[in-house]
Amino acid sequence: MDQRLLHRQFDNGLVLLGEHMPWLRSAAFSFLLPAGTCFESLGLDGLSGMCSEMVQRGCGDLDSREFLERLDELGVERGSSITTSHTSFSCAMPADVLATVLGLYSDLVRQPHLPEDQIPDARQLCLQELRALEDEPSHRCFSELKKFRYPLPFGRISQGSKQGLERIDISAIQSFFQENYKPAGSILAVAGNFQWEEVCDTVEQQLGDWQGTPEVELPELHSNYGSLHVDHATNQTHLALAYDCASYESPEYYEARALVGVLSDGMSSRLFSEVREKRGLVYSVFATCFSMAGQGSVMCYAGTTTNRAEETLQVLLETIHSLGDGITADELERLKNRIKSSLVFEQESSAARSSQIASDWFYLGRVPDRAEVCARVDGLTCEILLEHFRKYLPKNFSLVTVGSQSLELPEGTA
Amino acid sequence: MELLTHKTGAGPEIVVLHDPAAFTASLGWFVKTGARDESLEMAGVSHFLEHMVFKGTQRRTAEEVNRELDHLGAQSNAYTSEDSTVFYASVLPECQAHAVDLLTDLMQPTLREEDFETERQVILEEIAMYDDQPPYGAFERVTELFFGEHPLSTRVLGTTESVSDMLVTQMQEYHRSRYTRENMFLVASGKIDFAQLVDYVSQATADWPSKPAVRKPLMPTYGSGELLIERESTHQYYAAQLWPGVHCNAPDRYALRMLCSVLADEGGSRLFWELIDTGKAETATLWPQFFDECGCVIGYLCCAPEDAEENEEISRNVIEQTLREGVTQKEIDLARNKIASSLILSDERPSNRLFALGQSWLNRKNYEPLDVVLARYAAVTADDMMQVAEHTLRRPCATVKVVGPAE
């Protein structure tokens, strides 16, 4: 499996990346635009999501319906999403239609119609998603954790707020579009079975003369710590817990990620064993790494019936601290095997690979290949992990509970 | 790609879709047992047993099972439905022998009492979790209303009561009668060493219980009507509906899926343009589900409570108009393209092929290559779609609505 990153930097700042996977029948792309929630105007929470909804309501020569029908004719599976930093559009398709679809999405990011008469519909759609989130306690506790842990502009959630959505008008959408849908800071990553020359030509032709640089100055991020409870009439109490760790850009990210792997990757991981297998406290428990604005956090989740919530929190914290007792050689080997085989699984999906390439470029300004990742993972030892843990002991905890009973972090939790 | 099968004597059947160019190998045991095979008091036993399968065997403790799966770097899991229980793992091809040994060993678990008690708590947490989530049991309730006394009304997870009262001895008995050589088969896809698979499985399953499991086909008398669930914590309105459908081998199942796509596909369908694009609803969709002897069409609507009445009328009108006036050629072409593309993209992964092959073998002991399936969709006409609409969506449906507290 020859792996080579194809890269082209356009004068306008757009970065085009590609990785060839000739064994597939498909091609996929991820298009990241610097139009995430942290660039929303104050008081207009939900602007990035509503703008993304509006740009999909007709562009270039096609109205909203013609655009979607064209994608369906071509057999394109598509999605859009909003993160703190980006609005992103992703598509997977039969390989031979890639150039055509890139053309359609070029129109979408450059020449959307933004029809004013559809503002109420787009707003309703966004309000639907917000209400749906409020009904999903396991998702809601992560939204609340984000809002609680990260101050503005970082703590905004993709669904926005009711007040924010209600205030957004056509001029807010137009300004957000004009300021943030720009080539500088945008990343277009293509993976699968494609001809690089053809992709470059298409992008050059469609996006080469696109101009503009968004304002991306952001304040420094200082996280909030402590506990927050959100009352919700449910059987279970949903716990979301965060603490500091190395960020994705950090040279020590692999150590931090490996420690989270020992906690949460696979059925033999410590959280699954201690919280679910041995005690039967939960159906779902996990931990994951999350990075934003140069800061990393480990985010943990557990959902348990209310009368067992306190015990669950206690076991969760004890298990996190048990990393300080050392990592076994067996645990580390299992983790290495899991990471390495996941790199092979990624080779079976153009969509997964294009999204990973775009994300790596955003965080690192480069894309590590499999050989580099394997070498880095192989270099991890139990001693290195223990040393890392002791150096950065888990601290700066934030806890959010959603349910009918509040929980506090135990005294002494940093 | 090549289809390879093996069956000798009373041993379980082995079905492989071999792709020598694949990077990975996927393996799965398919057991023809699910919620519909349970008695009412044992509701949830298939699913509970699926959890218990990972709790150790004569040769492995529960911890060893989990450690080995992770050591293999396996992407593995299991699921239980109304009519089957499936255990699968995707691994690198060089790990095949270990993976098949582990998965096969798991099929004869020890089912120890102590593990049973701990896992019972996990299942009760799972039931509590789903009960907190939209649509708050609406699908379970509408299934009960629709299927009535028919075994397909049994809840896959069971109920808090049935799971709390279940005995480990009952589960052991259920396992002996359902996890038999005749009632299971092994499916594999990707880069597979077929000879190794056949040799190993033939030997390892030689002492498995042997007894054909019985499942009597039974035509349901489809129920209809309406039921309301009140929930304190809902912000949205949810409605689940069931119409009569077609069985898993009915020739018109392709037409039914195309019809559902024209009516209610997530992007670009009649209900999408009426309800989603306009922001009137968060979700408005229809999809078919197929069983041995019957089937259903499932409808799901989620929207703001104040819009519920209007949206339901719109949905009804969309269906009635379709029944009256039919579908256009353009809609047929778009639906066919969407379905074809989604099947082609999904078929790229050996792990996805495993489920397509396994499900097909469960339903009809037969596998049609992707190109044949695509041709079946290509052959569907507007008349086919209207004919299947007549004996599905034209008939009365069962509805369950979930509403928040009255203001």
Image: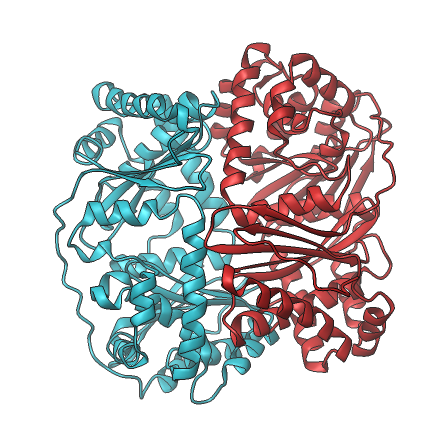
Chain B, hue in figure: cyan
How many labels were placed on the picture?
A: 0
Q: Which residue is at a point 66% across and 58% down the rendered structure image? A: A408
Q: Going by the image, does A253 lie left or right of A356? A: right
Please provide percent x and percent y for residue A329: 72, 81
Q: Going by the image, does A41 lie left or right of A268? A: right
Chain A, hue in figure: red
Q: Nearer the viewer, residue B311 or B57?
A: B311
**Quadrant location of residue A213?**
top right
- Quarter of the image where the N terminus of chain A is located: bottom right
**Quadrant location of residue B93?**
bottom right
Please provide percent x and percent y for residue A158: 64, 35
Q: Which residue is at a point 60% across and 56% down the rendered structure image? A: A239
Please provide percent x and percent y for residue B154: 25, 57
Please provide percent x and percent y for residue A281: 52, 68
Residue A227 visible in the current orientation: yes
Residue B250 visible in the current orientation: no
**Quadrant location of residue B123?**
bottom left
Q: Is residue A318 above or below residue A5?
A: below
- Quarter of the image where the C terminus of chain A is located: bottom right
Q: Nearer the viewer, residue B178 or A16?
A: B178
Q: Going by the image, does A74 lie left or right of A164? A: left
